[in-house]
Image (cartoon, helix red, strand yellow):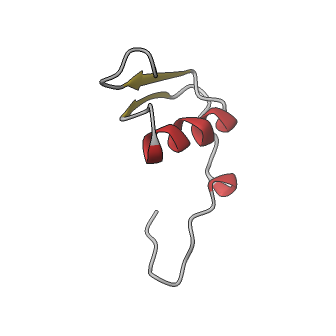
Amino acid sequence: MFWTKEQDFNPKYMPSLEGKVILVTGATAGLGKESVLQFAHHNPQRIYLCGRNLQKS
């Protein structure tokens, strides 16, 4: 999937992630956190979160 400046990314058009395993670094804030929230809507088998702060994780 490639985008140009004129195209916007919309996570609702992402293909199914069923059966996939996802590893997200920086998942406690910002882009990493939002990525986890969006990936969760697409039925992955597992999502692993990595972060430097155990309390936020």
* Quadrant in which residue 38 is drawn: top right
Q: Is 50 placed above or below 37 here?
A: above
Q: Is residue 50 left or right of residue 28?
A: left
Q: Residue furthest left?
A: 52
Q: Which percent across, then down, holds residue 31?
A: 45, 48
Q: Residue furthest top?
A: 54
Q: Which percent across, then down, holds residue 15?
A: 62, 48
Q: Residue furthest bottom?
A: 6
Q: Which percent across, then down, holds residue 49?
A: 43, 24
Residue at 34% x, 26% y is: 51
The C terminus: image quadrant:
top left
Residue at 35% x, 21% y is: 53
Q: Residue furthest front?
A: 55
* Quadrant in which residue 25 is drawn: top left
Q: Is 41 placed above or below 46 here?
A: below
Residue at 44% x, 41% y is: 32
The tally of labels here is 0
Looking at this view, is 27 or 11 the one in front? 27
Q: Which percent across, then down, holds residue 9?
A: 56, 65
Looking at this view, is 29 or 49 the one in front? 29
Residue at 54% x, 43% y is: 34
Q: Is 2 placed above or below 33 here?
A: below
